[in-house]
Amino acid sequence: MNIGIDIGGSHIGIGVVDSNGNIKKRKDIYIGLKEKTKIRKYILEEIVKTIDEWCGDKGKVRKIGIAAPGIIMNGNIKYSVNLGLSNYDLKKLLLKHYPNANIRLKNDAKCAALAEKNLGALKNHDNSVFICLGTGIGGAFFYNGRLISPRRGSGAEFGHMIIKRNGRACRCGNRGCFEQYGSMRVFKSRIKSCLNLSPRIEGEKLRKAIEDNIDNKDVKRIIDTYLDDVCLGLSNIVNILEPDTICIGGGFSKYEELLLDLLKERFKKAKYLFYKKNVPNIVVAKLGNNAGIIGAALYI
Ligand SMILES: [Zn+2]
């Protein structure tokens, strides 16, 4: 049995994945503020409880793949701003429960990228960049079909590329990071405050509110500024890595109709590109919030 686990800032997704990438069972576990105070114990206990419920016999668990945010080295979550964790050796802790299982951990954006590369939007794109515009910004890149894995487990942290000197404060401790301008969290919070919406409004309701106010000049300005910032960050990546295709995942993929064509149009103007003919193909991720689970279960 292959288990894929995606640990995010607000919930843990756990799934049983077959060899074709189909999720046969799935459970989502919420991580609230209360849980965050005892997060080390909570994550481990919830994972073990779920796997034991599904498998019964611990010997049947062949592989446990885990996607987690931050810097991961040899199964250890070295440093994760999102989870507020450092030196959390989850592999070692899980091995005590499942001594015969193949347990692997990798950065969550890299896991999602591997799933998109093998089964999703990047299937036929060998020189490509995957970028996840969500609560933060994560990324990965492929060269000649291979995921480039930085030796220390960091790297490809496109979200922490500084696009504005002395800009907005970032959770990583620096200022002016791309994710403080290009993440969907930033976009949504600016829209919510402009339209006086509750900070908790999300999903379909939020999208509808934007569509209903699409002619509002302040909303237009927010969309315009947001896409320009995304364009700036992506252009920096293109100037360095020269991908043929960029695949955008995370919350952005739910706003495909509203934002994708506008972003492509803006990119075509090549305002921030060094080589103006270097406009990559931009696609949206296909596997949604299953990508991390599938990637972790099958491809790490
Ligand atoms: Zn940062």
Image (tube, grey):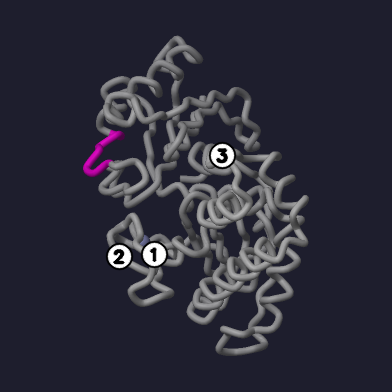
For the residues carrying marks 2 and 1, which lies nearer the camera in this image? 2
Q: CA distance from mark 2 to mark 1?
A: 8 Å
Residue 35 percent across, percent down from the top left: 34, 26
For the residues carrying marks 1 and 3, which lies nearer the camera in this image? 1
Question: Which residue is at the front of the view, 86 or 134?
Answer: 134
Name which of mark 2 and mark 1 comes first in the sequence. Answer: 1
Above or below, comparing residue 101 to residue 116 in the picture: above
Side (left or right) of 96 relative to 1: left
Q: Amino acid at mark 2?
A: Asn
- Mark 3, Cα crowd under 10 Å, few <14 / some 14-19 / many 20+, is many
Q: Read off the magenta span.
A: 85-91
Q: Residue at x 41, y 29 (%)?
A: 32
Considering the numbered disc 2 on the image, is that residue within a helix, a strand or a loop?
Answer: loop
Question: Which residue is at the front of the view, 66 or 28?
Answer: 28
Q: Amino acid at mark 1?
A: His
Residue under label 2: 174
- Contact check, label 2 and label 1, Cβ < 8 Å: yes
Disc 1: residue Cβ within 8 A of ligand 1's nearest atom? yes
- Which image quarter is the C terminus in? top left
Q: CA distance from mark 3 to mark 2?
A: 32 Å
Q: Residue at x 75, y 66 (%)?
A: 261
Residue 294, numbered label:
3
Residue under label 1: 160
Disc 2: residue Cβ within 8 A of ligand 1's nearest atom? yes
Residue 133 in sight from this viewpoint = no
Q: Quadrant of ligand 1?
A: bottom left
Residue 66 percent across, percent down from the top left: 42, 38
Q: Amino acid at mark 3?
A: Ile
